[in-house]
Image: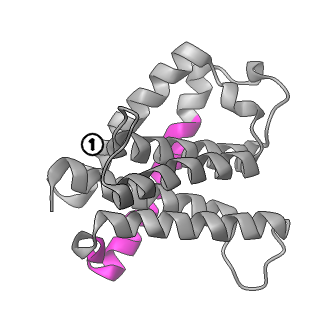
């Protein structure tokens, strides 16, 4: 498989879990403000780093699942940025949520393909722990942008950081699933 096919393969797995959670919980995440989504991604990335550093976990959930969660929360963040958060979970059907999911996944794929072209797939030579650190860095950048209420001087917005976090998580998933 080439990079695009691998990307689409792991994204299909992420979407499948997202769809199952929509069935179980509805779009309960619609009440989350973007800053809360950022903090949720932080929790997942921090857990990955903790497992990487300690070499063990006490909860029977692996790093793969945490990268999937980062992908899905990044897409939730993109949805929330584009539509705003809701006061109830009844404003979006599962079908509408999946339509939004697909729209943002497609945009992130397109970004990854452009960057992949320019960087000659440099990500393949990186360690998975570097993706974790880059995701954490993007989270801290995002928090700073959120604290500045988006009034940055030269930086990309929160949406670009969410897409980067998602793409780094996808790279981690590809390496975990397909190897080096």
Q: Residue under circle 1?
A: 9
Report whether 174 appears left or right of 140. Answer: left
| Secondary structure predominantly adopted by residues drawn in magenta | helix
Residue drawn at x 20%, y 47% as measured from the top left: 177
Q: Residue at x 39, y 65 (%)?
A: 131
Label 1 neighbourhood size at 10 Å, few (<14), some (14-19), many (20+)?
Answer: some
Asked whether residue 109 is in view, the answer is no
Tell me the SS state at disc 1: helix
Direction from residue 48 to residue 162 in the image, left or right: right
- Coordinates of residue 156 in the picture (x, y in percent): 66, 74
Rendered view: 129 above or below 75: below
Q: Is residue 56 above or below residue 94?
A: below
The answer to if 113 sits in the magenta stretch is: yes
Above or below, 127 relative to 43: below
- What residue is at 22 percent from the left and 75 percent from the top? 125
Horizontal side of 156 relative to 138 (left or right) equals right
Quadrant the C terminus occupies: bottom left
Coloring scheme used: one colour
Rendering coords of residue 66 (x, y %): 43, 43
Q: Nearer the viewer, residue 164 or 60?
A: 60
20 magenta-colored: no
The reply to whether residue 13 is in sight is yes
In the image, farthest residue toward the bottom: 154
Q: Position of residue 124 (x, y in %)?
A: 23, 70
The magenta stretch is 100-123
Count of numbered circles on the image:
1
Q: Residue, x 17% and y 58% (percent of image)? A: 2
Q: Residue furthest top?
A: 24
């Amino acid at each position: 498989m080439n990079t695009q096919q691998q990307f689409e393969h792991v994204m299909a797995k992420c979407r499948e879990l997202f769809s199952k959670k929509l069935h179980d919980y509805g779009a309960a995440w619609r009440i989350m403000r973007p800053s809360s989504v950022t903090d949720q991604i932080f929790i997942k990335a921090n857990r990955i780093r903790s497992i990487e550093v300690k070499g063990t976990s006490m909860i029977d959930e692996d790093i793969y699942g945490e990268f999937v969660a980062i992908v899905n929360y990044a897409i939730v963040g993109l949805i929330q940025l584009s539509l705003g958060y809701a006061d109830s979970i009844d404003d979006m059907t599962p079908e509408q949520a999946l339509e939004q999911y697909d729209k943002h996944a497609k945009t992130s794929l397109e970004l990854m393909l452009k960057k992949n072209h320019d960087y000659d797939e440099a990500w393949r030579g990186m360690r998975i722990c570097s993706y974790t650190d880059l995701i954490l860095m993007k989270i801290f950048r995002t928090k700073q942008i959120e604290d500045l209420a988006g009034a940055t001087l030269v930086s990309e917005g929160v949406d670009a950081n969410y897409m980067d976090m998602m793409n780094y998580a996808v790279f981690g998933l590809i390496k975990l699933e397909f190897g080096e």
